[in-house]
Structures are given as C-alpha cells and as structure tokens.
Image (cartoon, grey):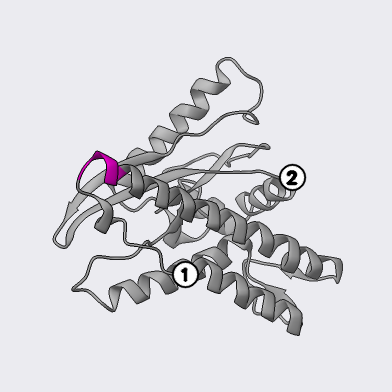
Amino acid sequence: MILLKHTILTLCVLLSLPIVSLADTISDDEQTLRAIAIAATVEDLIRTVRLQYTRIVVNKLEKEGTGSALHFNKRGYVPLPAQFIRSIGNVKRGKSNSNSNSLPEHQFSLRSHWNINTSQGLQDAFERNGWKFLIAQQDRHMETEKSLRYLTWKPYIKVENTPSGKILRYMNADIASSISCVKCHNKYEKTKTIMSYRRINGTTRTKEFKLYDLVGSIAI
C-alpha cells in the first residue's frame, strides 16, 4: 500500500506541474497555435496519468480483490480513474482561483452528456457546442464505417475574451478505449441512481456503450 500511495502522489505531481497560461500566448495566429499545442500536451498528460493510474494502482488492487469504486471509502478501494483525474483538476482550479487578479494557468475537467458524477455534465455553451461537434464526428464516421476504432478525433477549439484577457478553450473526445471501460460505464448506466438522473435531465433511455464509443470529453 505504501508503494501505491507513492505512485498516486507521483501521478498527481506530474499532472499538477505548472504550464504557461494559455491566455498569455494568445495575440496572433502563431501564438494561438502555440496555445493549441500546449492544450494538446495537457490532454496527453491527462490520458497518460489516467492510464498509468489504472495499470499500476487499480489493476493491482483488483487482483487483490478490491479495486476502484464510485464510493471508495471502504478499506482497500481507490477512486475510479475519472474521479482521480477530477480530483487533480479540482486542485488546479483551486490554485488558479486563489489568485483572481492574474490570468489562469491551464485548467481541465472531464465533461459528458452521459456523466455519472452530477458535477461533470456540460456546463456552458462552449461545452454544449463542443459535445455536438464531437457527436457529429462520430455520426459521420459511422455512416461509412462499422467501428469507431480508427476515427481520428478533432478537438473543438475557441478563443474567448474574459475580464482578465483572452483564453483558449479546448475540448476533445474521451472514448471507451477498453472492454473494462465499456463494462464499467454500462454497469453504472443500469443503476437506479443514474437511470433516475437521466430521466430528470430529459434522457429517457439507458445508454449502451460499445468499444471506442464517445463517452465523455477532456475540456481544457
């Protein structure tokens, strides 16, 4: 367990490293491209940290009879990979908000129309439009293909003006990349809590995810 705690701490530090503010890089086309490159790097870090957390921490605990769970207060259990990433994102937002007079460093969230955590739904016009953009890619691809495996996703990007200056917002697909991911999401879709939450939000049917389906997004 000491080794696992050390691994988790290392992953948290990796994803919390300061990266130059996106807003600081935006003034012309070249600087916007730099900001997009930074956002893509943050996205890659998020995916890498989550993958390593799953492989090194979650998989080890599952072999020992525990693992990750939505309610992880029981001894021997750890947060779901998405919860782990969300907790780091919350820390990042807290640090940025504590210095309200300056432009924010990178912030990130996991967002979805099919969110399990009530706080991870689509929050504003940018995220709702971004989700439509990603869904459209999925639908177009499935018109000619049987699987989403080889779809090259394109991020939804927008530069916005804020009281502190310009910022670049970036949103890309988060897919069900493994069978275990599909099983986990489908398991929660069938719970009474999630089914009730879907009805409240106007979704009357239960979602049945398949491998490589769009399940969420990484918003930066």
* The C terminus, quarter of image: bottom left
| SS for callout 2 | helix
Q: Residues within 10 Å of mark 2 (few under 14, many from 20)?
A: few
- In terms of sequence position, does the residue under pointer 2 or pointer 1 come before the other? 1
Q: Which residue is painted at 46% across and 33% down in the image? A: 135
Span shown in magenta: 28-32
Distance from label 2 to label 1 (Cα)?
Answer: 31 Å
Q: Nearer the viewer, residue 114 or 104?
A: 104
Residue 5: x %, y % from top left: 68, 80
Magenta segment: does it hold 38? no
The residue labelled by disc 1 is 17
Q: Residue at horizontal 58%, vertical 14%?
A: 144
> What amino acid does circle 2 point to?
Ile
Q: Residue at x 52, y 29 (%)?
A: 138
Percent position of residue 215, x then y: 55, 44
Please state the horizontal and vertical placement of residue 87, each as a whole percent of the image.
50, 70
> Residue placed at 78% from the left, 63% from the top?
59
Of all residues shown, which one is farthest toward the front? 30
Main SS, magenta region, reads: helix
Residue 19 in picture, x, y percent from top left? 40, 64
Residue 201 visible? The answer is no
